[in-house]
Structure formats: C-alpha cells, structure tokens
Image: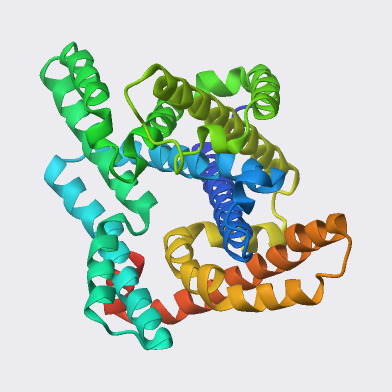
Amino acid sequence: MELSKAQISTSVTIDKAHRIAYWDITKSVAIFCVVWGHCLQNMTTNTGYLWSDGLSQLIYSFHMPLFMVISGYFAFGSLSRPIGITLKKKILQLIVPSISWFIIISLLAMTLHRDFSVERLRHILFTLPHSFWFLKALFLCYIIALAGVWLMRWHKWSVLLFVMIIFCLGEVLNFSSTISMLPFFIAGLLLHIHEKKISSHQNWIVVCCLLIFTSMFILWEGNEYNIYQNPFKHSWGGYKVLLIRTIIGLSGSIIVLWTIKMLSILAKGNSIVMHASKLGTMTLGIYCAQVIFAEGLLKSTAIQTLDLLSRLPEILHHIAYNYVITLAAAILTILLCVFVIGFLKRFKFTRIIFLGEQL
C-alpha cells in the first residue's frame, strides 16, 4: 500500500515536530542541571563543597558540555550563511544579553549592598568580559567554526593548518574556557552531519559511553579535570586534563541525549512533557536570570534553613542539602525565571537586549 503525498507530508511534519520537541526537552533537562548545579555550589558557606560532593561533580562533568553539544548541533545551519550575517546575529543573540544582564545584576548588587564606590565600579568593569562565560565561549566557538568553514571552501587542506594554529594558540584563545568547550561544539556539528549513521549504531555507542563514563568518573574526581581549576595549558598535564574532560563530557552528554530520546518516545504526546519542553525555548533567559535567584536572593534563605538543620547527623544534613533544599531552590528558581522571561517578552526592547530575540 503506497502512501499519498499528503500522508507523507503529514508524517514528515509529525516527525519533525517530535524531533524539535525532543531537543527542547533535552535543553530543559540541561538548563535544570545548570541551575541545580549552581544552587549546590552557592547555597552553602563551604566554598569547597562543589569539589567534594559526588552529586555536584556528576552534574558538572556533563552539564555545560551537553549544552555546547546542543549548540553545535543547531549551529550547522548558521555556518552555511554569509559570515557577516551570522556574526551580527550571534552578537545580538549572545553578547548583547550577556552585557545587559550583567549591568542589571551589578546595579542590583550595588543597591542591595549600598556600595557605589570607585573600587566597586572597577571590579564591575574588570568582571564584565568574563561574565556569563558560556555565552562568550559559544560566540568564540562560532567565530572559530566560521573561519574553519571559510578556509574549507577556499582549500580543504588549509583546515589542518588552521586546527594546528588554534591548538598552538590554545592558552591565548582559551578566554572563557573556549578551547575547553570547542571539542563539544565540534561534536555537536558532527552529530548533525552524521546523525543517521550515528543513530543506526546508537545502542552500541551508548553502552560504550556508559562504560567509559562510569569508569572514568570513578577514577578521576571533578577537581582533577574541571575547567575552573584546570584551564587549558600547553603541558603533558594540561593535555591529559583536556583529554579526560573531553571524554567524560562527551560520553556523559551522549548518555543523557540517548536517555531523553528514549523517554521522549515513550512519553510522546504527554501534555506534561510537552509543557516541560517549553523550558527548552527559554534557556538563555534562564541561564542569565538564575544568577539573581540561585546565586543571590535565595542563597541567604538556604543558609538559614541549613542552620536550623545543623543538629541533624552529617549524612541527613547532606541529603537535606542536596535533595531537598537545593532541589527545591532550583525548581523555585526556574519558576521565577519563567515569570521574569514572560514579563520581558511583553516588550520589544527587552526581548532584544535581554533575550537575544531577532524581531
């Protein structure tokens, strides 16, 4: 029995809609991991908690790599457009919101602390280039990828020389951990290009990734390969850290992608899942706005709550912090961010400067 053109068209539309929903669900999970990770990191007076806690290390091993893989996957279309158009779009989409949010957050902090000193202003100006580092790293990954595509069109072998130059200048170009994130961006591009071939072997790939991730996560602690304490350096130790970080991040990202894909197929059409996927369309706004709540306003409340639980045995105190206080704070932060984004979407100007929307 042959399908009519209308049936084929409808089938393709449904598949495309499901595919987009799957990626939105993936982005929703990724942004929740980011917010939860920031809550775990910031809602305690123990500054070293992030590097000693297993849950924190688990989240930090894959959450930003996963976001960069997703970004690389969707960058494929942008790289085929004229360079000038893509650069303008990414400046408006990534750089402008990062600056706008930083200015607002800095003004809020200055007002709350009643600190309008020259030293405070100097600190703000010094911190500005490093604020919302992931957006800056993603922008630089686009620039590197655009240069690579342009060279490939000119002469395909010139890309090898370009890769060598990028690697040699790694320490200089690692602004906002760009070199550390670049392998994941490239992995996302390759996933888009070879998606059908990869999908045909996905079960074997996931099994291998699960074995690799589990064994490496046990062998190496997060403080041995994280990008904050171990930036890219030209040394055998630096290469080792980059390799470990890349393998753990990629294998963890693939496991999450496959898991969400399977769950989204099982829950296809579920209204709760579809509503949850809407978070995936707000990731930039949530990533920026969560600083106000997860890293600011809710922090003191969490610390006060922990003081009330200080008499609990250490293991119960640990469980309460990881799976009650910070988890609840992450959910509340997401809800507050959604409310803020809904307000910002009401005005054209705020949609442009805070959400990076192209109108």
Which residue corresponds to the image point at 36% horizontal and 52% vertical from the top-left?
A: 133
Residue 100 in the image: x percent, y percent? 29, 71
- Residue closest to the eye, 154 or 13: 154
Answer left or right for 324 relative to 42: right
Disc tally is 0
Foreground residue, 292 or 233? 233
Q: Whole-percent x and y of residue 82?
A: 15, 40
Q: Could one spot residue 214 in this view of the protein?
A: yes
Judge from the rendering whether residue 17 lies leftward or rightward of residue 104; answer left or right. Answer: right
100 left or right of 66 in image = left
Q: Position of residue 279 (x, y in %)?
A: 55, 61
Would you identify the image quadrant in which residue 207 lies? top right
Dividing the image into 4 quarters, which one contains the C terminus?
bottom left
Question: In the rendered image, which quarter contains the N terminus?
Answer: top right
Give the vertical position of 290 relative to 139 (above or below).
Answer: below
Q: Which residue is outermost to the top?
A: 157
- Asked which colour scheme the image uses, the reply is rainbow
Relative height, residue 115 to residue 120 (above, below): below
The image shows residue 153 at horizontal and vertical percentages of: 15, 22
Q: Residue at x 65, y 21 (%)?
A: 212
| Residue under the point 64% across and 32% down | 255
- Residue 358 visible to an observer of this rendering: no
Q: For this rendering, which residue is in front, 189 or 169?
A: 169
Identified at 50% across, 29% down, the residue is 245
